[in-house]
Amino acid sequence: MELLSKMATNDGHGENSPYFDGWKAYDSDPYHPTGNPSGVIQMGLAENQLCFDLIQEWVLKNPEASICTAEGANNFMEIAIYQDYHGLPEFRNAVARFMEKIRGERVRFDPNRIVMSGGATGGHEILAFCLADPGDAFLVPTPYYPGYDRDLRWRTGVQLLPIVCDSSNDFKVTRESMEIAYQKAQDSNKRVKGFLLNNPSNPLGTVLDRETLIDIVTFINDKNIHLICDEIYSATVFNQAEFISISEIIEQDVVQCNRDLIHLVYSLSKDLGFPGFRVGIVYSYNDAVTSCARKMSSFGLVSTQTQRLIAAMLSDEVFIDKFIFTSSERLAERHDLFTEGLAQVGIGTLKSNAGLYVWMDLRRLLRKFSFDAEMELWRIIINEVKLNVSPGKSFHCLEPGWFRVCFANMDEECVRIALGRIHNFVHLQDKGITTEPATTPKKQCKLQLSLSFRRLDERMMMGAHIMRSPNSPMASPLVRAT
């Protein structure tokens, strides 16, 4: 007799992925500027640490917002006892208002439709349970966030079917690619119940234009399937781009659509940099889904202490306006610092204007144009260069050689050290590059598996010195500022 359940013994959580293996490599040998300077630098974590100084300043100025301070202790009992799992009214009002603000005040959100969840992870699972039965499928454009395999599939039994996108048009989803994926599912007798959309995109760092959003809404309406819109990076947009929410498309009647098919997932993990607070939001235009989601939310509520603190912070509109502006400015500066550093050694990135990462093109460094070669390159980057970057294969990218690399979860000095490591690695690899036409992604290099980075600390210092030279673009005041 089996002692444990099938769920407890299967690998549906998705931890057998290079995406999570990179984290384990970091955990076993984490970089520290003095304690372990040759350790692995964590560039696989999409975390926004660029504005913690603003948050800390606000907390110090508003101690009464927390019941765990002398100023807020008088409200301790009121907040600590059981609350309605609908959430504190001031919390739902403040979140709805914040969601409106970061969408340019072009849409309105009903606080009564705000449903709490344990981060976006819990929100996605709630919607999967509400919209689909085991064996049903959601379409999702590739490449997509590896955690979706856990969030939507593991406990629900839902399948994720790829809508194949590639670099020929900067990985944009098209009506043709949607139709191909839907027809393939029909041919395989798989019932498609929904479409999962991530905007801004993780891992691409791009925002969808209005025409593409209209195409997607038209598609799901024609097929009578649900649309789950993951908009957790909506306030990380920079470089004069404009984020267009799916809510704007349907509320302004740009396209005919059954609103019962539209559902949003949001959180404060990325926009405010609060992943540890586990503040997730489900917002559905469907009354039945809102009602069911609220019942399910009892398995992953946000603590009332957190709700109270967040409500006070989000209600301070002067602070929030300053935070949104400063965060966007700092993300743009950090993005420019990192991408310009990569460009110095001929590494390209997909043009992006959102997110906490870039989609890095290392196709020319592949031994051959295959996923085996991608994994070989990734192992060298992890084990020898000591950088945790995430290979495209783990994001279900159908094109080998792309990697997601995060830049907002560390200070500027750490970014420069990481760039120094990349510079040294690429310079060594370039010595073995073979001659092939420049138009093919199959340009090869002889990967020297025996490369020694044991004296990497010396090379990093040399690389950092080079990057700070007056002739380097990195020496510009704009790039240096954070």
Image (spheres, rainbow, N blue to C red):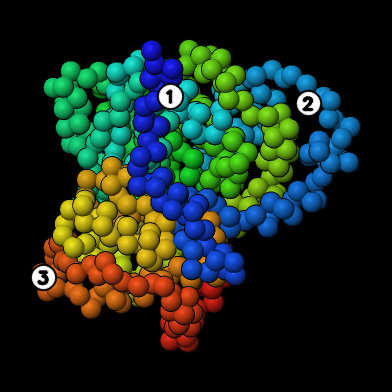
Give the alpha-carbon distance from disc 3 to disc 2, as whole Å: 67 Å
Q: Which residue is mark 3?
A: 436
SS of the residue under disc 3: loop
SS of the residue under disc 1: helix
Q: Are marks 3 and 1 in contact (CB under 8 Å)?
A: no
Residue drawn at (82%, 45%) of the image: 63
Q: Amino acid at mark 3?
A: Glu
280 relative position to 255: left or right: right
Residue drawn at (36%, 31%) of the image: 11
Q: In this view, which residue lies farthest toward the bottom?
A: 470
Q: Which mark is residue 80?
A: 2
Viewport quadrant of the N terminus: top left
Residue 442 versus residue 451: which sits nearer the camera? 451
Q: Position of residue 467 (x, y in %)?
A: 45, 79
Residue 343: name its quadrant.
bottom left
Residue 89 versus residue 372: which sits nearer the camera? 372
Q: Which residue is mark 1?
A: 8
Give the alpha-carbon distance from disc 2 to disc 1, as whole Å: 33 Å
SS of the residue under disc 2: helix
Q: Position of residue 122 (x, y in %)?
A: 51, 28
Q: Amino acid at mark 1?
A: Ala
Residue 237 versus residue 265: which sits nearer the camera? 265
